[in-house]
Image: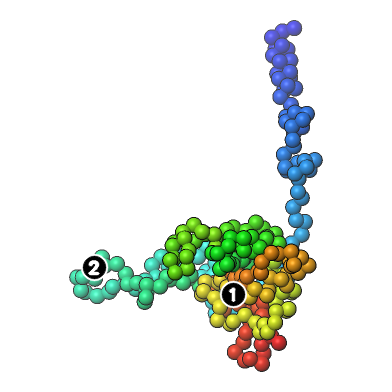
């Protein structure tokens, strides 16, 4: 046997030794399988289809938004997602006065922050819902912390997400409030849990509210966020709480809902959300009855 044959056999032997091993062989006989393995007890299959409300928004509402906001005489380059907005939108000092040279630009009136640069609505920048935040403040928790437990359990039931406890940021003597004291709870929803909450809120809770005429048509912060509050009688109307409402030791407070959209102004955000959340109109006869 010559040297070439010996080297060839050694190479084949090393290839056989370095063959691909299975996950079970690498981890050992009694080691737990990773969570992504279908044979693992921690494996949870992902969603196989989009939520019903998400499909309704993408297939129906967004098409109506494109038609309702269409403008014929618009430059397509300005609406492109790669279009760079003006770097400096403040008013510059112009003139021959030597004091104007290298002087910083003028601030807006009242030193208000500049609003986002508005672009025409295109399929690339549709006003989709990005996040929903549900928050509440329990005034009774200042005297007894146990009142906050009922609120945390209620938010966990209607959202399916563990709430985050909100603590006071500073001391307020008239309210007997100390910094770091728990006073409320908040939940941030995204993805499927967000659409589950919105569907239950719009289809089961809002229609059952007494004397509900719709959300005020003036809500919004000019950047695409819609916020509104609901009374304490809204929480017991959720099906997750309605059947076991007697088991909660304390009364449930009202809560606030903040819907963050990708819209560039409040009017467009209300237009996109009006399909599932009713808004008041200028004519009282057209409001929800």
Q: Quadrant of the N terminus?
A: top right
Lower position in the chain sequence, tag 1 or tag 2 = 2
Residue 157 versus residue 252: which sits nearer the camera? 252
Disc 2, SS: loop
Residue 258 versus residue 135: which sits nearer the camera? 135
Residue 186 versus residue 214: which sits nearer the camera? 186
What residue lies at 46% left-to-right and 59% top-to-bottom?
Answer: 179
Residue 47, horizontal then vertical, whole percent: 75, 56
Residue 144, horizontal then vertical, whole percent: 58, 62
**Can you tell which mark lies on residue 101?**
2
Question: Looking at the image, which residue sits at the far front?
Answer: 143
Residue 182, horizontal then vertical, whole percent: 54, 59
Residue 107 versus residue 58: which sits nearer the camera? 107
Asked if 43 appears above or below 255 in the picture, the reply is above
Occupied quadrant, residue 67:
bottom right
What residue lies at 67% left-to-right and 90% top-to-bottom?
Answer: 286
What residue lies at 56% left-to-right and 68% top-to-bottom?
Answer: 139
Question: Looking at the image, which residue sits at the far left?
Answer: 98
Left-right relation of 268 to 236: left
Occupied quadrant, residue 196:
bottom right
From the image, state whether disc 1 or disc 2 is nearer to you: 1
Q: Mark 1 points at which residue?
A: 228
- Residue 111 visible, this angle: yes
- Tell me, yes or no, whether the two marked residues, 1 and 2, touch with CB atoms within 8 Å: no
Graded by Cα atoms within 10 Å as few (under 14), some (14 to 19) or many (20 or more), the crowding at tag 1 reads: few
């Amino acid at each position: 046997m010559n040297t070439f044959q010996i080297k060839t056999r050694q190479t084949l032997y090393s290839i056989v030794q370095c063959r691909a091993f299975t996950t079970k062989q690498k981890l050992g006989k009694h080691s737990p399988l990773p969570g992504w393995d279908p044979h693992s007890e921690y494996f949870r299959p992902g969603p196989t289809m989009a939520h019903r409300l998400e499909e309704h928004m993408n297939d129906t509402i967004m098409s109506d938004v494109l038609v309702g906001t269409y403008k014929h005489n618009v430059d397509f380059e300005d609406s492109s997602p790669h279009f760079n907005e003006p770097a400096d939108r403040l008013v510059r000092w112009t003139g021959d006065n030597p004091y104007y040279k290298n002087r910083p630009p003028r601030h807006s009136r009242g030193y208000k922050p500049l609003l986002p640069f508005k672009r025409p609505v295109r399929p690339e920048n549709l006003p989709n819902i990005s996040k929903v935040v549900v928050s509440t403040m329990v005034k009774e928790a200042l005297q007894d912390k146990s009142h906050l437990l009922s609120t945390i359990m209620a938010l966990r039931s209607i959202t399916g997400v563990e709430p985050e406890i909100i603590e006071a940021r500073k001391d307020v003597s008239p309210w007997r409030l100390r910094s770091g004291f728990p006073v409320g709870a908040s939940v941030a929803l995204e993805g499927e849990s967000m659409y589950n909450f919105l569907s239950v809120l719009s289809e089961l809770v809002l229609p059952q509210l007494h004397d509900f005429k719709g959300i005020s048509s003036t809500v919004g912060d000019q950047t695409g966020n819609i916020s509104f509050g609901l009374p304490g009688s809204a929480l017991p109307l959720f099906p997750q709480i309605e059947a076991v409402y007697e088991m909660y030791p304390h009364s449930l407070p009202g809560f606030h809902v903040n819907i963050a959209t990708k819209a560039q102004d409040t009017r467009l955000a209300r237009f996109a959300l009006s399909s599932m959340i009713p808004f008041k109109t200028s004519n009282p006869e057209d409001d929800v009855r």
